[in-house]
Image (cartoon, rainbow, N blue to C red):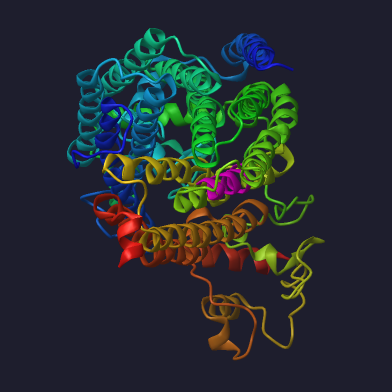
């Protein structure tokens, strides 16, 4: 091919692909506005404006896009209820002492709009993103439900319950509430002491000392005791 | 600038202030990168004066700015040479530079002192700065186009360069409105980000690369012109619909999973061709490359482009994998590798070819320049490896096992970000500083040989 012919192919082909993209764009935006995202109210739009103005997106991802410094916000209104979100956004330190989230000095109306925006984002059809972790537990009827800390601390990365999780190095805990493991007690008192400091309780154990809040520790103990 | 410049046209000297600004902003970009990497490890560091989000905005914007200024400087030099004519207006080129610098300083001041932004990564600059940025680029386009039309000397290099520059300017206009719907906003935002870096910037970069290859090896122009058209055609034929790999999870229809996967899997093909073309051209050269340092950066750019953009990008482009890696440090590893390989190394190659000429010499003494090359290349490789490990660990723990994001970030990711910071500080930053020193004070190669 001559140089001229190649130039024409380059320009012509580019135009063709741009036309295809334009057609796909028209269809995509139609579907997005008609069905895949909820209706944008003025409150949601203003919440989005606040989100941008404060540059939230350079610490947090949303729909997986943005900074990897702080948690993804796509499903934040599923994880946290409205009153908690409002309290946290109004004064992060008061709602969650020790957090590295700086106070954004938001007006009460801005806080409400931001929360409305997050609730709107939760209902976007994201083709199933973020995916459910492989370690999620499907709870059978009559069996206790694992607390958030079970997933959050990835206990299933070492332990198995009802055939779900890893088969080692930790023991299967499916019946830890009725069958003690390795001559260790299974009372709530012992389990609480154990989770607070495994190596201190049994030197040489592979179980690490995990940073657990008192609430997380309590939730795990009641869960383990209920596993009969 | 010395008055005894070895340039063929006086107006080419206007490239110097563009390159100087680019080199200084590059150093600043790296410093902001070090600050935000440090914040991963020590979260309270500068927490109140420069919170992470505004440090990151500065890091990203400085990168865009210095690369654009570098590409513009190279374009002014190249267009005068290729058309064998003076640039239409040197004062207009200065106006173009000053407007962009004012816009840049304005945007950064908004982040640092006002803590306000427009809030999309890479395009954080709040109004009115985006308008000024657009104005600066339009002044550049007017200057280049009048030069090209007056000289009536269009060839493959000037044509693709102008094509890419017009494209990237038009795409930037999608940044100006406020979109009420987040999905619609991201939809158009990717037209800027993706169709820049995997489209129009690539076209501009390919044109500059072809120019440098001609200059370095006295290669057959018509052969290189054909390569150039084939490469840029394949970049756009794969990349335009390849935008679909950004439309998997943001609320856009499901068919993008298929189209994005197919076309983005083809995106590495033109990058392979660029490497083949570059090495073939050097093998069949008609002249010995006189400027070895430029050749190192150019070869490094071709390889870095393929591995950083092609391989690292391909590794996470299929939806089956991207579902897990999306929104993790895996993306940061790809971003650093690709931007450095495809664009930073190319702009630096252009600078090592052009800046000595603007300062009145053929080329710089080699020794110090090679230090800059190896420190930056090895430093960036180490940074990319640390980011990649951070990303794989993060993907495994948070996405597959479902661990809490902050627990993983503070206990595992921060360890690898420490290494990003350490390699950046101890290896990469010194390389950048040597480069700046070389830029300002490089000695002619002949003098070094005599000494």
Q: Is residue A170 left or right of residue B160?
A: right
Please provide the residue range marked out in magenta: B298-309
Residue at 59% over, 91% down: A203
Residue at 71% over, 28% down: B263
Quadrant of the image occupied by residue B323: top right
Q: Is A198 located above or below residue B224 in the figure?
A: below
Give whichever of A213, B192 is nearer the camera.
B192
Q: Is residue B271 left or right of residue B214?
A: right
Residue at 46% over, 31% down: A118
Q: Is residue B201 left or right of residue A179?
A: left
Residue A223: in magenta span: no
Q: Is residue B247 visible?
A: no
Q: Residue furthest bottom?
A: A203
Quadrant of the image occupied by residue B255: top right
Give whichever of B139, B323 is nearer the camera.
B139
Q: Is residue B213 left or right of residue B145?
A: right
Magenta stretch: helix, strand or loop mostly: helix
Residue B142, percent across and down? 33, 12
Residue B185, percent across and down? 47, 21
Locate the C terminus of chain B by quadrant: bottom left
Residue B302, percent across and down? 58, 44
């Amino acid at each position: 091919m001559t140089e001229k012919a190649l130039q024409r192919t380059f320009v012509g082909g580019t135009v063709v692909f741009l036309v295809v993209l334009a057609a796909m764009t028209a269809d995509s935006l139609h579907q997005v506005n008609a069905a895949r995202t909820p209706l944008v109210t003025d409150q949601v739009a203003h919440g989005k404006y606040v989100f941008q103005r404060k540059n939230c997106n350079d610490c947090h991802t949303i729909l997986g896009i943005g900074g990897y410094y702080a948690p993804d916000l796509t499903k934040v209104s599923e994880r946290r209820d409205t009153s908690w979100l409002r309290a946290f956004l109004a004064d992060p330190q008061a709602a969650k002492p020790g957090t590295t989230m700086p106070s954004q000095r938001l007006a009460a109306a801005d806080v409400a709009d931001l929360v409305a925006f997050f609730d709107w984002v939760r209902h976007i059809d994201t083709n199933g993103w973020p995916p459910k972790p492989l370690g999620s537990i499907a709870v059978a009827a009559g069996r206790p439900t694992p607390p958030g800390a079970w997933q959050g601390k990835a206990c299933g990365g070492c332990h198995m319950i009802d055939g779900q999780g890893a088969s080692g190095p930790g023991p299967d805990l499916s019946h830890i509430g009725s069958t003690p493991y390795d001559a260790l007690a299974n009372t709530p008192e012992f389990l609480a002491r154990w989770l607070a400091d495994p190596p201190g309780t049994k030197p040489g154990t592979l179980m690490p000392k995990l940073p657990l809040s008192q609430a997380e520790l309590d939730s795990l103990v009641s869960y383990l005791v209920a596993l009969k | 600038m010395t008055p005894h410049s070895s340039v063929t046209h006086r107006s080419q000297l206007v490239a110097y202030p563009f390159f100087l600004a680019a080199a200084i902003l590059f150093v600043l970009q790296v410093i902001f990168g070090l600050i935000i990497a440090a914040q991963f490890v020590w979260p309270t560091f500068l927490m109140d004066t420069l919170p992470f989000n505004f440090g990151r905005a500065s890091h990203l914007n400085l990168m865009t700015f210095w690369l654009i200024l570098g590409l513009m400087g190279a374009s002014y030099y190249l267009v005068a040479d290729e058309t064998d004519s003076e640039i239409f207006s040197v004062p207009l080129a200065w106006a173009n530079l000053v407007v962009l610098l004012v816009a840049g300083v304005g945007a950064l001041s908004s982040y640092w002192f006002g803590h306000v932004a427009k809030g999309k990564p890479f395009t954080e600059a709040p109004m009115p700065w985006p308008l000024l940025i657009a104005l600066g680029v339009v002044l550049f386009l007017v200057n280049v186009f009048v030069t090209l039309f007056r000289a009536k000397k269009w060839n493959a290099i000037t044509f693709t360069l102008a094509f890419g520059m017009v494209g990237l300017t038009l795409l930037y206009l999608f940044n100006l409105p406020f979109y009420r719907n987040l999905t619609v906003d991201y939809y158009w935002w990717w037209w800027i980000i993706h169709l820049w870096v995997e489209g129009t910037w690539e076209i501009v970069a390919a044109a500059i690369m072809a120019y440098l290859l001609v200059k370095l090896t006295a290669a057959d122009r018509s052969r290189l012109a054909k390569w150039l058209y084939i490469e840029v055609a394949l970049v756009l034929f794969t990349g335009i619909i390849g935008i679909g790999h950004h439309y998997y999870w943001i609320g856009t229809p499901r068919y993008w999973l298929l189209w994005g996967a197919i076309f983005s899997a083809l995106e590495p093909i033109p990058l392979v061709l660029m490497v083949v073309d570059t090495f073939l051209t050097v093998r069949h050269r008609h002249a010995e490359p006189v400027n070895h340092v430029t050749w190192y950066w150019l070869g490094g750019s071709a390889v870095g482009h393929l591995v950083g953009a092609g391989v690292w990008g391909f590794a996470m482009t299929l939806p089956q994998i991207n579902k897990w890696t999306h929104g993790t440090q895996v993306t940061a590893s790809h971003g650093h590798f690709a931007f450095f390989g495809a664009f930073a190394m190319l702009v630096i190659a252009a600078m090592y070819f052009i800046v000595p000429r603007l300062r009145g010499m053929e080329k710089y003494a080699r020794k110090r320049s090679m230090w800059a090359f190896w420190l930056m290349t090895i430093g960036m490789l180490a940074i990319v490896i640390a980011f990649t490990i951070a990303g794989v660990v993060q993907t495994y723990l948070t996405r597959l096992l479902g661990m809490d994001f902050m627990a993983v970030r503070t206990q595992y990711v921060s360890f690898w970000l420490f290494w990003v910071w350490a390699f950046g500080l101890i290896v990469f930053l010194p390389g950048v500083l040597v480069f700046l020193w070389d830029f300002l004070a490089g000695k002619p190669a002949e003098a070094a040989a005599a000494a």
